[in-house]
Structures are given as C-alpha cells and as structure tokens.
Amino acid sequence: MTQYKAPRGTHDIYGQMALALEELDKISRAVFRKRNFKEIKTPMFEDVALFTRSIGEATDIVEKEMYVFEDRKGRKLALRPEGTASLVRAYIEHRLDIEEPMGKFFYCGDMFRYERPQAGRYREFLQMGAEYLGNSNPNADVEIILLAKEILSTLNINDVVIHINSLGCQNCRPMFRQKLVNYFSSIQDLCEDCKRRLEKNPLRLLDCKIDSQKFQNIPTMQVCLCEDCKNHFKRVQSLLKTVDCDYFVDDKLVRGLDYYTRTVFEVRSKVIGSQDAICAGGRYDNLVKELGGQQIPSVGFALGSERVLMAAQNAGFFNKLPKNDIIFIALADSELFDEAFKFANNLILNKNNIKQKLNLQDNIVVEGPFLNKSLKLQFKLADKIEASKTILFGKTEFDNGKIIIKDMKTHQQQEVSI
Ligand code: ATP
Ligand code: MG
C-alpha cells in the first residue's frame, strides 16, 4: 500500500504544538482587541493579479513562490502568499472606510509560498497580522510596532531586536534607486538573481543572501530621504523612545514586497536559528490607491506563528500551557455501562450542579467510560492521559447508590452517593 505523506514543506500540527497554537491565538486576539483592532477573514485564494499588482512583479514571492492555478472556468487564481493584499481588497470592496472608520484590522490564517523548506520555513505556514488603514501619522507606525512587541512580550519573548528603516516615498526613493544602480553596476560577478533584479528592483539586492558579503559602503536611504520622510522617520524614533521601546536603525533593511513606503521594520530573534525574522511589516501609503481605492496611507505587520512558537517554546511557554483536570470514568462491571455513560454525559453538562456536589472544578475534561477494557487497562489509560481523578462504577457500590472517586496522585479513594 502507498504510504501517504504530508506534501513537502507542509506540516501537521498536533499535541502540545496544537495546544500552544490555540493559546497563541487566544493571547494575540486579546492583544489586538485591546487596541480596538477588528478581525477580518478573507479567502485563501484570490485573483492572481491582486498579488502580482500589490507585491510587485520582480519580487521573489511573485516570481517563484506563488501557488498559481486555474479553476474549471479558466480563472487564474493564487493561494494567498500573504495577508495584506487580500485585506486591502476587502477594505475597498466593502467600503470598510465607512463601516470601520478607525481602519484597524487583524487577521490570522494560512499562507502559501513555494519555498525551499527548512526549520521555520514552510510552504504552508500561519501568519497573524494587523493593518492600520487611513492614518498617515508616525504614531500609527509606532502603534503597529508596539502591537507586535506586546504580543511577543505577553508570550515572554523579550529577547528580540526590532530593526527599523525608512524606504522613503515616491519623491525620494528614485534618487536612492539610481544611487544603488550606479553602485551595484560597478560590482563584478553579481549572482544571476541580482543581475536580473538590478534592472527591475535594485533595492532587493541589499538583502541578497549570496552577494551581500561583496557589498561595502553601500549608499543608504538615510541620506536620500526627502524632508517629509526624514521628519516622519525621526518622529517614529522619538515616539519609540518615549514609550521605552528599544530599536536598531538598520539601513540595509528592505522588504520582499514592493508596496512598502517610509517605515519598514522586522523583529528578529537569535534563539530560533537562521530564519530569525519572526515579524515584519511597514508602511504602505499607496497600496490602497494602487488597488483601486482612495489614497489611504496605511501601516501593518505580519507575525509568522510557527516562528513565534519556536521563540515562545524557548521562553518556556510550553510548560505553562493551561491544563484542565481530566476525570476518567472507569467501569468495574460492564453491565453498568449505560449508567456510567449517562453519568459522564450529566457531568459534561453539569446537570443538577453535579460538579459542585462532587467538588470538581468547572473546567474539567471528562473521559470514558469504555466497554471491553479490563479495569487494569482502564487505570493504565487514566494514568497515560494524566487524569487527576477516576470515578469508578462498581456493582456493589452502585447498588447502594454510590460511586468511588479515586485521586490518581494520592491514590486515596472515597465513596460518594449519587
Ligand atoms: P523571510 O525573510 O524569512 O523569507 P519574509 O520577508 O519573506 O521572511 P514576510 O513576507 O514579511 O516574510 O512575512 C512575515 C513573517 O512571516 C516573517 O517574518 C516570518 O516570521 C513568517 N514567514 C514568512 N515566510 C515564511 C515561511 N515560508 N514559513 C514560515 N514562516 C514564514
Ligand atoms: Mg521570504
């Protein structure tokens, strides 16, 4: 028989990891909501043009990472590689500028990129992101950075560095671009990717993993920024200082998507290995207009959930996952199965406040009863799943209207009337 395996680059999430993910989801939702960010769910696939248009033709994502397919009617679609384009599409389509005038949204979901799989790099992965639409003020950039930082610190992930940079705007970036083209043109033996990008997207050469060692004294955007962009970037930094948020100005920081303007940032963690970016984002003042909406300056970020969990695991998060008491219903006599089955159901529904009467907590987990398993095996199972108590149905006790509650740690048992 064929042994089926999960497709290359995908991974199954189960056990502790699934619990941790659930907890991460809860924690981040609470942080988003505190700052009045509202959830938006968009489809996992969209018109492929939405992504090529927004992310940019000459980017890794569009050139080689997208899952593109045609449906039965010949529509060209793509599995979403990121969340911002879809969110902006939905914002324009549903006139959310009117319905949600604060323009604050968050999303959580699967993204798809055809990349070379490695630790922390998958072909299907999870992102949580926030977008703040319609606020051009530097305080929006800072709010977005703080939001990301707060999610991480709630998970005890404090060992991170926030890299920030400014990519300027339509007015000043062309000068930077030209300087880069001049600079890179003088460098011998650029890799094939860099040669190709030099024409289309010279900023991308800055984070080429192959050629970056060859680059010295690269022109920086800082010196090219126009007055407005300079002031914007200064204000972002002074506000970050005001709220005691440490950051590092990294003039080599560029992003793999074309829509960014002005502030870009990345949160990196050394503890998770070479794929050290756990969160990335920035300002995109022209994207909404590019996609057919009004001029709505905006800023956002995306956190990679798997990488966040790697960092969280390192910070001891997995040892502190909430754990509910498990109550195992055991049967000494199989003829009592129906009674025990009914009891388990009543316990789950807390009929007649049975939990309180039995001194059990409200959030207990109920397991069992099972037929055709020896009592020994039932207790073994109860131990295996780390049940805190076993409620045993035995013929003699039951005929007297009683059950036995056994504490699995102390091994004490008591008979209780039901
Ligand atoms: P990288 O430089 O690691 O490729 P990126 O710049 O492509 O990241 P973004 O598109 O900005 O990443 O996505 C934001 C976050 O999503 C990243 O910081 C990372 O945590 C996560 N992420 C991106 N690609 C992947 C992937 N293939 N697998 C797992 N997580 C990913
Ligand atoms: Mg990438």
Image (cartoon, rainbow, N blue to C red):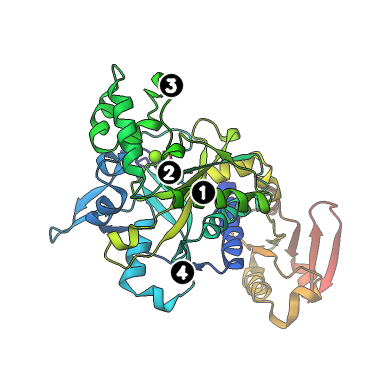
Q: Tell me the element at label 3.
A: loop
- Between discs 1 and 3, the one toward the N terminus: 3
Expressed as whole percent of the image width and height from the top left, the position of residue 283 reads 44, 53
Please report the residue visible at 47 percent of the width from the left and 51 percent of the height from the top. 302
Above or below: residue 155 compared with residue 398: above
Between label 1 and label 2, give the one nearer the viewer. Answer: 2
Residue 364's image quarter?
A: bottom right
Q: Which residue lies furthest to the top in this view?
A: 188
* Residue 348 falls left or right of residue 219: right
Tell me if mark 4 has few (under 14), some (14-19) or many (20+) residues whose alpha carbon lies within 10 angstroms of its own: many
Tell me if mark 1 has few (under 14), some (14-19) or many (20+) residues whose alpha carbon lies within 10 angstroms of its own: many
Checking the image for residue 216, the label placed there is 3
Under 8 Å from ligand 1: the CB of mark 4?
Answer: no
Q: Tell me the element at label 2.
A: loop
Q: Kindly identify which residue carries mark 1.
A: 233
Amino acid type, residue under disc 1 in the picture: Phe
Amino acid type, residue under disc 4 in the picture: Gly
Are the residues flagged by discs 1 and 2 in contact, CB closer than 8 Å? yes
Q: Which residue is more in the foreground, 351 or 238? A: 238
Label 3 – label 4 distance at C-alpha: 41 Å
Expressed as whole percent of the image width and height from the top left, the position of residue 241 reads 65, 49
* Residue 40 falls left or right of residue 160: left
Q: Kindly identify which residue carries mark 2.
A: 225
Q: Quadrant of the C terminus?
A: bottom right
- Between discs 3 and 2, the one toward the N terminus: 3
Expressed as whole percent of the image width and height from the top left, the position of residue 181 reads 29, 31
- Between discs 3 and 4, the one toward the N terminus: 4
